[in-house]
Image: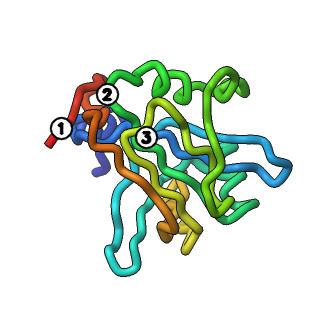
């Protein structure tokens, strides 16, 4: 017997995770991004992270096109950014400050709402059910300790601090 989708969602909602915006640049230069909590570290040597993206995601399409992405770990107080990037809107970047990474890889680094970011080059794309796991080798990144990190569980945001 397989767990129902509703029960599976309830179980997974109990697992706290970082509130992140994963971004990528499409081949035509259009920025793409989406909110997700299905992001985690994979390896220290080499430094790697993974993000699980829906097969129909425009951000996944941009990652496939350019071979790189950025994980923006949001800081507490930026719930509005997390909610904006959780929509299907094409205007997610309108009025938002962002910059390209120093290497030019990855997607937009969101400014003013970042607790940390990791710029990644795709090491593997793994098909997994209705999602694709993007495994990225981290080329550059930065952590800003002055703000607590925004976390998410049970459909609520909260501050995660050390």
The x, y position of residue 68, in whole percent, is 63, 62
Q: Residues within 10 Å of mark 3 (few under 14, many from 20)?
A: many
Residue 113 - label: none
Q: Quadrant of the C terminus?
A: top left
Q: Looking at the image, tell me whether mark 1 or mark 2 is earlier in sequence order.
A: 2
Asked whether, in this view, residue 157 is left or right of residue 90, the answer is left
Q: How far is the residue under mark 1 from the one under mark 2?
A: 9 Å
Taking depth in this image into account, of 120 and 144 the one nearest to the observer is: 144
Is the residue marked by circle 2 packed among few (<14), some (14-19), or many (20+) residues within 10 Å? many
Which mark is first along the chain, 3 or 1? 3
Disc number lying in front (3 or 2): 2
Instruction: Pick out the residue farthest to the bottom.
Output: 45
Residue 7 showing in the rendered view: no
The residue lying at 37 percent from left, 40 percent from top is 115
Nearest-to-viewer mark from 1 and 3? 1
Q: Residue furthest right?
A: 28
Kindly identify which residue carries mark 1: 161
Residue 20, disc: 3
Query: Quick check: 23 above or below 97?
Result: below
Q: Residue at x 28, y 37 (%)?
A: 146
- What's the residue at 81%, 54% (across, down)? 27
How far across and how far down the image is residue 64, in percent?
Answer: 70, 61
Asked if the residue at tag 3 contacts the one at tag 1, i.e. Cβ–Cβ closer than 8 Å, the answer is: no
Residue picked out by circle 2? 76
Q: Secondary structure at mark 3?
A: strand
Image marks 1 and 2: residues in contact by CB distance under 8 Å? yes
């Amino acid at each position: 017997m397989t767990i129902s989708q509703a029960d599976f969602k309830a179980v997974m909602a109990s697992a706290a995770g970082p509130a992140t915006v994963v971004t990528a640049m499409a081949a035509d230069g259009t920025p793409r991004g989406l909110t997700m909590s299905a992001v985690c570290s994979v390896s220290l040597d080499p430094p790697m992270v993974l993000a699980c993206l829906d097969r129909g995601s425009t951000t996944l399409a941009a990652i496939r096109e350019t071979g790189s992405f950025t994980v923006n770990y949001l800081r507490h107080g930026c719930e509005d950014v997390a909610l904006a990037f959780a929509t299907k809107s094409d205007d997610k970047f309108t009025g938002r400050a962002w910059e390209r990474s120093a290497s030019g890889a990855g997607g937009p680094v969101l400014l003013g709402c970042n607790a940390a970011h990791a710029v990644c080059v795709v090491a593997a794309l793994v098909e997994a059910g209705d999602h694709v796991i993007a495994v990225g080798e981290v080329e550059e990144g930065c952590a800003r300790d002055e703000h607590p990190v925004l976390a998410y569980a049970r459909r609520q945001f909260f501050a995660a601090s050390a």
